């Protein structure tokens, strides 16, 4: 076991993937000499050379589009989008090309492309640097969408994403890049938990709290705080947003009878909407209350000084827990 | 690592792509006036007094830029993208514009905001993280600065198309960097502008770097030469020469106003500071390069030229320094006047018309804040003043 930050764990995972498979190439803006603005690719160009770790011209459509061509040629491109808000110039290539080519080629062409995206807020950044665009991609057939939340998962999941023959949108919780954790660099991928499987990170009996990315830590903190009030929260780290591991969530909700989903992204058409609907369909008779979503507001990401009024935090998550449990002093009665 | 290691991938080295001898230069780095039959007629009005005013502009924006960087270092601003080194490119072009011309800039054109009379607080509020943006675009003829690289080139083109379709001779100008020329939006803008003879000036500040990427990665030839392929003139000027920039921009604007269509101006300059205050340029460029470009300073050459023209440059410098210091002090004072936004303003301006969905969210969040204390809904500090989580519940 080594203690690594989440960013360093990703770095180690990428290094391992580059070493294991010569068809793996990293592409992106400032990922080579600079090592990425978050230093996730630090040192990799020096180690593997400028043809494996490629600083590209400044164009997201260019990066993703050429990754498609490289995939046609048998490469496994790992693309870095510098910040969440800069993925949109590459959106067409992702949803119309990367996502659909296996289908359009009647299964003949694989798109084993990994698109790494630092996502989410909480770092006091300028506009377009704190977005949570995951729902657009979860909505798109042909893409897998995952989000890591801790160094150990980051190390394994990034390699799993690269090994996947389907394209993967890989969301990295940028405000947790510096969080440290134990990473087992000797573990083989064969033994690892598949990236499509969710993890129960805290067990509980009253409420199932589902989240992903940066809010996993916040949800755990909420569970600890609630325990002092005698409320037992089960926290599930979704890990895979598409497809969702419903088996894990269903089993939990059958026991707790209550579901709260929290994410930084807005509520409308979000991952939480899908989870709430699907769990209601699948576990209706087990639910004691309507599922509750605790999300960012349906607004453009606000200026840094307002972001704490946008992002779900411990208090807002606990308020959601109160609502789902119908506890006094909650906002139950008010529809969100 | 130096840019020359790009040889391995066959890309131009930086020095090749920025040879200083193939651009228009009217004032050499040491202040000699170079005659140019095509450009000189466009600046006949620039007497020593006018040149002194250009110097004043450049000195003041440099001082404002330094002060803003200091404010960021002191925690008053979240981020600041310095313009240092690009004073001539920005002032020379900015002072070529007419008041009714519309500016579509990136994040670095603070000197354009200066030319347009933007108040210090309006300049800083966005970088302080206090507002979505500073000034009202229609009050200053300058759009909301653009962070999405290249997007504004299309906006400038559309604005110019509109101005022409209305039969006016107003022009638009798009500011973007060398890196931006790789984005689809910029290339699409060039196509649209050419197809519609749009009265727009594409003003590219080639400051040699896009964060850590040298311009040689974006282009194998001078950026200005691309214009030809799009069907418009491209002109490459010494971007550290305020007179060359002024003349080139005036020529481009004249062409636009005559209905002759767009022009691409490549101003060859250098970003003397970091990409932003969050950047560490030591990781990707050498001190030698800084020294080299330091020798091409946009202000020093103007001073030398004024000196040679018999202007009392010591007096000028004294006056300008005093004025620049005042501007810096105003900037510093302005920061403290920027109020923290009230919590519920997060719901403002999302839509122009009432929106039932968002109204419900606002109502919900208002009640949520009210659980903490009565003042929090209006105050700017609800979360900070909120009681511990246990009490809140
Ligand atoms: C669409 C998009 N992709 C990436 C970025 C991140 N980014 C911000 S500035 C920058 C470099 C821009 O370089 P250039 O166009 O030369 O302008 P300069 O900063 O040198 O003024 C990059 C990659 C962004 N803001 N928008
Ligand atoms: Mg640049």
Image (spheres, coloured by chain):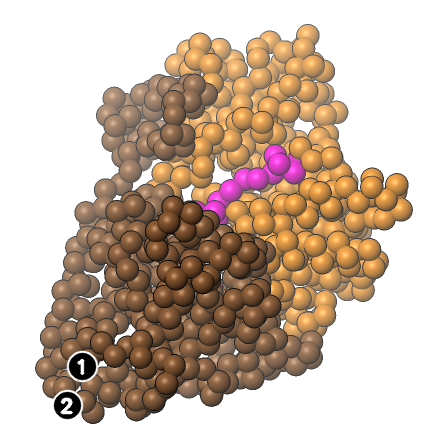
Please rate how many residues cluster around mark 2, counting C-alpha atoms within 10 Å: few if below 14, some from 14 to 19, many from 20: few
Q: Main secondary structure of the magenta part?
A: loop
Please report whichever mark, 1 or 2, sits nearer to the chain's N-terminal start: 1
Residue A290 among those drawn in magenta: no
* Whether residue A73 is situated above or below residue A168 in the rendered picture: below
State which chain disc 2 sits on: B
Q: Nearer the viewer, residue A125 or B268?
A: B268
Q: Is residue A68 left or right of residue B84?
A: right
Q: Position of residue B91 (x, y in %)?
A: 30, 68
* Whether residue B142 is situated above or below residue B293 in the rendered picture: above
User: What is the number of the mark on residue B310?
Assistant: 2
Query: Dots 1 and 2: beta carbons under 8 Å?
Result: yes
Q: Position of residue B64 (x, y in %)?
A: 25, 64
Q: Nearer the viewer, residue A83 or B119?
A: B119
Residue on which the image places disc 1: B48
Q: Please give the name of the residue rendered at 54% of the width and 68% of the height, measured from the top-left corner.
A: B227
User: What is the number of the mark on residue A173?
Assistant: none
Q: Is residue B21 left or right of residue B296?
A: right
For the question of whether residue A329 can be seen, the reply is yes
- The image quadrant of residue B388 is top left
Q: Secondary structure at mark 1?
A: helix
Q: Please give the name of the residue rendered at 49% of the width and 71% of the height, measured from the top-left corner.
A: B234
> What color is chain A drawn in?
orange
């Amino acid at each position: 076991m080594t203690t690594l930050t989440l960013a360093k764990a990703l770095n180690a995972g990428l290094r391992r993937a580059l070493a294991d498979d010569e068809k793996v190439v990293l592409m992106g803006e400032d990922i080579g000499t600079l090592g990425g603005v978050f230093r996730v690719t630090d040192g990799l160009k020096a180690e593997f050379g400028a043809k494996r770790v490629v600083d590209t011209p400044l164009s997201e459509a260019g990066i993703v589009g050429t990754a498609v061509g490289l995939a046609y040629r048998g490469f496994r491109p790992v693309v870095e989008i510098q910040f969440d808000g800069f993925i949109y110039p590459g959106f067409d290539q992702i949803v119309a090309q990367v996502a659909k080519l296996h289908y359009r080629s009647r299964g003949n062409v694989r798109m084993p492309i990994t698109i790494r995206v630092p996502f989410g807020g909480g770092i006091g950044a300028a506009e377009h640097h704190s977005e949570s665009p995951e729902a657009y991609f979860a909505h798109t057939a042909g893409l897998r969408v995952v989000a890591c939340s801790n160094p150990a998962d980051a190390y394994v999941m990034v390699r799993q994403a690269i090994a996947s023959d389907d394209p993967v949108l890989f969301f990295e919780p940028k405000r947790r890049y510096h969080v440290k954790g134990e990473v087992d660099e000797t573990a083989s991928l064969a033994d690892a938990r598949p990236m499509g499987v969710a993890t129960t990170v805290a067990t509980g009996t009253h409420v199932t709290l589902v989240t992903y990315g940066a809010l996993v830590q916040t949800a755990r903190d909420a569970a600890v705080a609630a325990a002092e009030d005698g409320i037992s929260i089960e926290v599930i780290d979704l890990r895979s947003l598409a497809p969702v591991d419903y088996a894990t969530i269903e089993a939990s909700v059958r026991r707790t009878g209550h579901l709260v989903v929290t994410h930084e992204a807005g509520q409308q058409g979000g991952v939480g909407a899908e989870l709430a609907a699907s769990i209601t369909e699948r576990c209706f008779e087990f639910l004691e209350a309507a599922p509750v979503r605790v999300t960012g507001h349906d607004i453009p990401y606000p200026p840094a000084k307002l972001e704490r009024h946008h992002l779900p935090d411990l208090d807002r998550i606990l308020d959601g827990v109160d609502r789902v449990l119908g506890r006094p002093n909650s906002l139950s009665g008010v529809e969100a | 690592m130096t840019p020359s290691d790009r040889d391995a991938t066959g890309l131009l080295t930086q020095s090749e792509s920025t040879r200083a001898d193939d651009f228009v230069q009217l004032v050499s780095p040491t202040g000699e006036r170079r005659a140019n039959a095509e450009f000189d007629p466009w600046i006949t009005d620039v007497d020593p007094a006018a040149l002194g005013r250009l110097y004043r502009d450049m000195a003041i924006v440099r001082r404002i830029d330094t002060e803003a960087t200091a404010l960021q270092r002191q925690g008053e601003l979240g981020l600041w993208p310095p313009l240092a080194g690009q004073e001539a490119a920005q002032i020379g072009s900015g002072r070529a514009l007419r008041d009714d011309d519309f500016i579509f800039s990136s994040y670095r054109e603070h000197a354009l905001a200066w030319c347009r009379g933007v108040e210090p607080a309006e300049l800083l509020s966005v970088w302080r993280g206090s507002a979505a943006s500073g000034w009202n675009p229609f009050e200053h003829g300058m759009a909301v600065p653009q962070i999405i690289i290249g997007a504004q080139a299309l906006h400038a083109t559309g604005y110019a198309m509109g101005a022409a379709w209305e039969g006016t001779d107003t022009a638009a100008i798009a500011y973007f960097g060398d890196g931006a020329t790789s984005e689809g939006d910029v290339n699409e803008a060039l196509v649209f502008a050419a197809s519609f003879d749009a009265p727009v000036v594409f003003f590219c500040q080639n400051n040699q770097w896009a964060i850590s990427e040298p311009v040689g990665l974006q282009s194998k030839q001078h950026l200005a030469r691309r214009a030809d392929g799009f069907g418009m003139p491209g002109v490459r000027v010494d971007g550290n020469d305020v007179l060359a920039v002024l003349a080139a921009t005036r020529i481009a604007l004249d062409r636009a106003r005559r209905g002759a269509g767009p022009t691409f101006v490549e101003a060859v300059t250098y970003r003397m500071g970091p990409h932003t205050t969050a950047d560490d340029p030591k990781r990707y460029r050498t001190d030698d390069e800084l020294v080299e470009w330091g020798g091409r300073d946009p202000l020093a050459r103007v001073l030398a030229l004024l000196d040679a023209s018999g202007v009392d440059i010591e007096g000028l410098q004294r006056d300008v320094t005093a004025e620049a210091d005042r501007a810096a002090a105003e900037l510093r004072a302005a920061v403290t006047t920027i109020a923290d936004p009230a919590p519920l303003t997060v719901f403002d301006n999302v839509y122009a018309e009432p929106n039932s969905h968002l109204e419900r969210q606002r109502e919900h969040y208002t009640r949520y804040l009210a659980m903490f204390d009565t003042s929090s809904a209006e105050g700017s500090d609800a979360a900070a003043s909120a009681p511990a989580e246990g009490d809140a519940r």
